[in-house]
Image: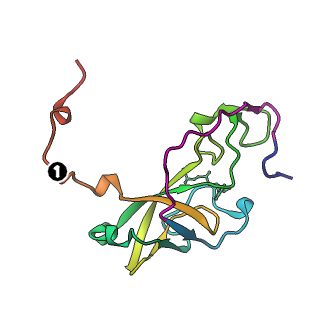
């Protein structure tokens, strides 16, 4: 039986430093079918269930233009995660990997990111498919899928720099 927030064989927890104030604001809330972390998908799938992203004011005006993209990137705060593991054992078999080699929700800054299919935008509600988070998860950001996005601003010197 897998328990939430357990320390598994071989895992290493550290004394996590006090949080810096990054000044993050939750810009909305994500509504999904999942109320139990152990029932969520490990990774969302583009043909997964429709989920609703509720965007709070005053950010609704910032949606202008987003509907042109078939897929968008959603960033969210995995608020129920512990944040102090440096080695984790996803299979609970004693085999561990470093946290940064995993996409586990347990990380010093529990930011989740998914590429999702954009189904619709109506007012402050986006309907998407491809999420993997709990109902009520706080929303951090929305962006066009980078593979569909061409920078609009003129190029800068760094755009032409290559190694060597
Ligand atoms: N797709 C994202 C990524 O790769 O950055 C998140 C992947 S993470 C492995 C997804 C898992 O996080 C879910 O299966 C669930 O167990 C857990 N999870 C979902 N919502 C959460 C929340 N609000 N707080 C903590 N854990 C959550």
Q: Nearer the viewer, residue 80 or 112?
A: 80
Total number of numbered labels?
1
Quarter, ligand 1: bottom right
Q: Residue furthest left?
A: 154
* Horizontal and vertical percent position of residue 53: 49, 71
Helix, strand or loop at mark 1:
loop
Residue 155 lies in quadrant = top left
Q: Residue at x 47, y 63 (%)?
A: 27
Q: Residue furthest right?
A: 1
The stretch of residues the image draws in magenta is: 7-27
* Horizontal and vertical percent position of residue 141: 44, 58
Asked whether residue 25 is drawn in magenta, I would say: yes
Crowd class of label 1 (few under 14; some 14 to 19; many from 20; radius 10 Å): few
Q: Residue at x 61, y 54 (%)?
A: 78
Q: Residue at x 82, y 34 (%)?
A: 9
Residue 70 lies in quadrant = bottom left
Q: Residue at x 31, y 53 (%)?
A: 147
Q: Is residue 122 left or right of residue 5?
A: left
Name the dominant secondary structure of the magenta segment.
loop
Q: Which residue is mark 1?
A: 153
Asked whether residue 71 is drawn in magenta, I would say: no
């Amino acid at each position: 039986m897998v328990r939430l927030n357990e320390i598994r064989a071989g895992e290493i927890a550290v004394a996590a430093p006090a949080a810096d104030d990054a000044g993050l604001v939750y810009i909305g809330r994500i509504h999904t079918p999942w109320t139990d972390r152990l029932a969520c998908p490990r990774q969302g799938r583009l043909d997964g269930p429709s989920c609703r992203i509720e965007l709070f004011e005053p950010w609704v005006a910032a949606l202008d233009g987003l509907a042109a993209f078939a897929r968008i990137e959603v960033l969210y705060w995995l608020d129920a995660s512990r944040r102090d593991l440096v080695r984790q054992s996803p299979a609970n078999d004693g085999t561990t990997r470093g946290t940064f080699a995993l996409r586990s929700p347990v990380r010093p800054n529990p930011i989740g990111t998914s590429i999702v299919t954009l189904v619709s935008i109506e007012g402050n509600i986006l309907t998407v498919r491809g999420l993997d988070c709990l109902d009520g998860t706080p929303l951090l950001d929305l962006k066009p899928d980078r593979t569909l996005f061409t920078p609009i601003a003129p190029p800068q010197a760094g755009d032409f720099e290559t190694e060597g």
